[in-house]
Amino acid sequence: MYKVFFKNKEIILTNRKTIFYTEKKTQLIDFDAVDHFRQKVTIFLRSKKYHHLIIFSENVTQLKKSFFGLFFQIKAAGGIVFNSEKEILMIKKNGYWDFPKGKAEKGEKLKTTAVREIKEETNINAVLTKDKPYKTYHIYHYHDELAIKTTYWYEMKQGKKSKPEPEKKEGIEKAKWVDKESAIEKIDKSFLSLKYLLAYILK
């Protein structure tokens, strides 16, 4: 199963109709029987009526390939960084709290991207503590088209100590360490995909 986010909308790609929402703002698409797949997805993204879309298929691998193929694809990487006091590194950008991340450069390894972006955006030196990333998928407007960004999130710890400093030229307003409770509170008012990410890291 894959969860993809667009603004306040949630799209689930799954192999069976096992997930249902009790509210009426959910739309279902049978990928194996549907015609005009691109059109139906586009209508959902533009719709103000539906907030959830469940697309199901017997072959989820093919479903994911076809769905992602509808969009320009971007890879990014970032991290959830803890300091010695178990505080979490957060940034505030464009009015929303987030975790440091950025696009991968051509030929760059994703782990390298994550460490580099954290340093650039916050001035914090980060060291990986787990090799396996948590992936989030997010659709957004990129130039004149819609793109889907796959972000690889790594769990990290602070390396050589330095003071958080926001990269203001990139629109980052704040960079700071916050305790777990504050992180949960800030993310609750931010992007839905980050709620799943933080819950996974803190479980």
Image: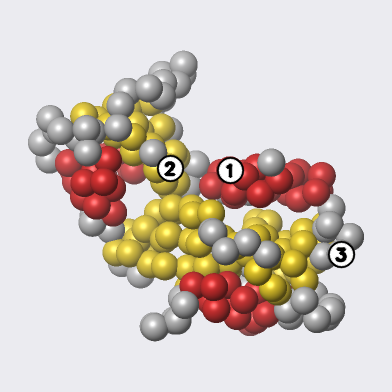
> Circles 2 and 1: CB distance less than 8 Å?
yes
Q: Amino acid at mark 1?
A: Tyr
Give the CA separation, mark 2 to mark 1.
10 Å
> Which of the 4 image quadrants contains residue 42?
top left
Between 129 and 1, the one lying in front of the other is 129
Q: Amino acid at mark 3?
A: Ser
Please name the residue that numbered disc 3 is placed on.
84
**Residue 44: % across, % down:** 31, 38
Residue at 49%, 41% in the rendered image: 8
User: Where does the C terminus fall, quadrant-wise?
Assistant: top right
Residue at disc 2, secondary structure = strand
Of callouts 3 and 2, the N-terminal one: 2
Residue at disc 1, secondary structure = helix
Q: Is residue 34 visible?
A: yes
* Circle 3 residues within 10 Å: few <14, some 14–19, many ≥20: few
Give the CA separation, mark 3 to mark 2.
32 Å
* Circle 1 residues within 10 Å: few <14, some 14–19, many ≥20: some
